Image: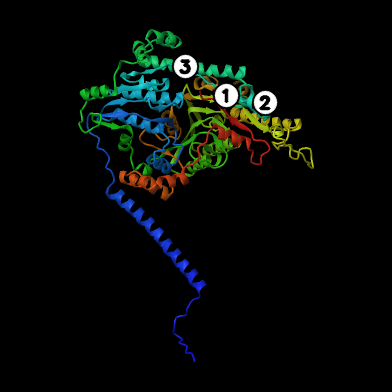
Amino acid sequence: MSETYPNAPRRRGPIARVVVGAWDALNFTRRLVFNLLFLFLLVVVLVAIFSAERAKPLLDRTTLVIAPEGALVEQFSVDPVSRALGKMSGQDVQEVRLRDLLRVIEKAADDKRIERVLLRTDRMAFSGYASLREVADAIGALRASGKEVIAFGEYFGQAQYLLAAQANEVYMDPYGGMVLEGIGRYRQYYREGLQEKLGVDIHLFKVGEYKSAAEPYVLDQASPEAKEADLYWMNDIWRRFVGDIAKARGLDAAALSAAVDALPEGVQAAGGDLAKLAVEQKLVDGLKTLEEVQQLLAERGEADEDSDSGVREMAWDAYLKHVTSPMAAADARPQVAVVVAEGTIMDGEQNPGNVGGESTSALLRAAREDDNVKAVVLRVDSPGGGVFASEQIRREVEALKAAGKPVVASMGDLAASGGYWISMDADAIYADPSTITGSIGIFGMIPTIPRTLEKIGVRTDGVGTTRFAGAFDPTRSLQPGVGEVIQSVIDKGYRDFTGKVAAARGRSVEEIDQVARGRVWSGAQAKERGLVDEFGGLRDALANAAERAGLGEAGTWGVKYVEKPLTPFESFVAGMAESRLGATMVARTGFADRLLMQAMPGVAGDLRFIEQALSRDGQPVKAVVHCFCMP
C-alpha cells in the first residue's frame, strides 16, 4: 500500500530535466555576458572621466608644427566612430579636412602665443589645385601677419612644394630632392582587351564630342577632341601654378618654366643631385637635416628639454582643439549653413565620401527647415554621377531659394558634369581659377556579352511577346532599334541639362551649347564663359551668402556645417576613444577590429561608379553626367 503526499515536489522526467537545465544554463550565460559587457563599459566610462588625458597647455613662444598627413578633403570619407577606431587599430584613412587646416592657419596668425611655424608638407597627398591654392593663400596671409614660417621637407612633390614655397625659408634634407614635372593626365584604354580578347561589346551613347569619360571602354587611345580640351585647361592651370611659385619665391616665371623643360640638362649639371639643383634654382634656401632645422628653431625660439625635438612646440591637430569652441553647436547667432557635396553622385543614401541623391537632399532640407539658418553654402567637390540623383539635389537648392534662403555654390577642386548640375541654380557660383568645372554633357553605356559567352560554348535564345521584350538583356546582342531608343533618351537628357543651365545663368540654350558639348574648363576659363560668377574660396562664398541674407558684418553670424548626426552610441564610442587609456583598452581587447567590421562604410571609387552605372536597377536606360577629369 502506497501513500501520497500532496505537498511533495513533483519529480521531472529525464527529458524535462535536460530541457530545464539547458534553459537555466542559457539564462545564466545571457546574464553573465550582459553583466560583463556592462562592467567593461562602466570601467571605460570611469577611466575616461577620471583618467582622461589633459590637453597640453599652450604657452608663450610656442612653435606651431603644421605637418598634415594625407589628402585634403572637404569631409572625412568615414564616420567619426570608424575613424577613431581605425586610428587606434592602425587602419585609419589618412585625411585632412580643409576647413580644419584653414582654421588653424587663420587662428595662428592672430595668436600671440604662437611665435613661429614649422611647415612640413612632404607627407601630404595631392588632392587638387584649387584647395592647394586656398591653403597657400592662407599661409601667405600667416606670413604677412608677421609670423615666421619655416618649411622643411625630405622630398617635395610639386603639389607639396606649392605650399612650402609660401614660407619665409625653405629647407630640404641633403639627400632629398624635388622635381617640377608639369601636369599630365594619362588613362588606360580597354577596347582591345574588352572587345577583342574578352568579347565584351560596349555600346556608348552620348552628346558632346568632348564628353570623354567613357572613351577608355570604346577606344584604344584618347580622341583628338579629348586631347585638345584637356591640354587647354591643363596649360591654364600649369601657368598659374608656375606663377604662384615664382611670386612666392621672387623668381621669374618664364625662367622657372624654362628650367622645368630643361630638367635633364639641369640634373646632369648638378651631378644627379636633386637637392643641390633645387638650391641652385633658388627653390630652397639650404640643405639641412630635420635635427638641424629643430636646432635652428630652438636657437630662434624657446628650447624645451622635455620635447622630443628640443623645441617648445605644438602639433597642428592639438592646436585645433585649443581654437575650436565646444559650444559651437549652441551658437544662437544667425547661421550660414554649409552642406558638403564631395564625391561621386549616386542614387539613394550614401556614406561619407560619396554624394547621395537622398542623403544630400536631406541635409539641404534640414538647412531649409532650421529657422536659425538664414543662408546656405553648397560646397561642391564632385566629378558628377547619375542624372536623377543630381536633379534631386538641384531641386532642393531651388526649394531653399523659394523659402527665402540664399544659396551660394562654392566649387572646390572639381565641380564638373553632375557637380555643375547641382551648382548651377545657386544665387552665385564661386570657384578658384584652378578649379576644374564644366563638362556639361551626358552619356549612357551598355555592355553586351553574347560573344563572351560563345567563347565558353554558351548561347542565349528564347522568345518574347514583342520585339523589345528582353531587349536590354546583356547576354543578347543590342538591336539597332534599342540603340535608337537609348540615344533619344541621352539626347533628351542633354537638352534638359543645357536648358536648365541656360535658365539658371540667364543665357540662351544656343550660347550654353557653345561652351558645353562635354568640354572641361578651368575655373578661370569657366568665368570667362559665364559659367562661374566670382573667384574665391569657401570663406568668400560664406561672406557672400551672409551679405545676401542681410546678416551684417563678420562676427554677427556663425557658420554651421549640416551633417548627418551621430547616434548616442556613436557619440559615446567616439568620445571614449579620445582618452589614451580608453584607446589602449579598446585596442588590446580587439574590440576596435570587431566594431570596425560593422561600422566601416564601403569605400567607393570610379570602378564602383561604373559598376552602378552599368547595373541599371530596373531602369532600361540610365543617363550619366560624370567626368573623369582629375589630373
> Which label lies toward us, 2 or 3?
2
Tell me the amino acid under the disc marked 3.
Gly
Judged left or right of residue 385, residue 543 is left
> Which label lies toward us, 2 or 1?
2
Work out whether residue 27 or residue 20 is closer to the camera in this orientation and state it: 20
429 vs 168: above or below: below
> Counting other residues with Cα less than 10 Å from the Cα at mark 3, is it few (<14), some (14-19), or many (20 or more)?
some
Q: CA distance from mark 2 to mark 3?
A: 35 Å
Regarding residue 532, the answer to whether it shows in the image is no
User: Where residue 161 appears, x then y in whole percent?
Assistant: 39, 20
| SS for callout 1 | loop
Q: Which residue is identified by label 1? A: 188
- Identify the residue shown where x is 58% and y is 26%: 506
Q: Which residue is identified by label 2? A: 196
Tell me the amino acid under the disc marked 1.
Gln
Residue 182 disc label: 3
Q: CA distance from mark 2 to mark 1?
A: 16 Å
Work out whether residue 423 or residue 64 is closer to the camera in this orientation and state it: 64
| SS for callout 3 | loop
| SS for callout 2 | helix
Q: How many marks?
A: 3
User: Where residue 218 appears, x then y in whole percent?
Assistant: 65, 25
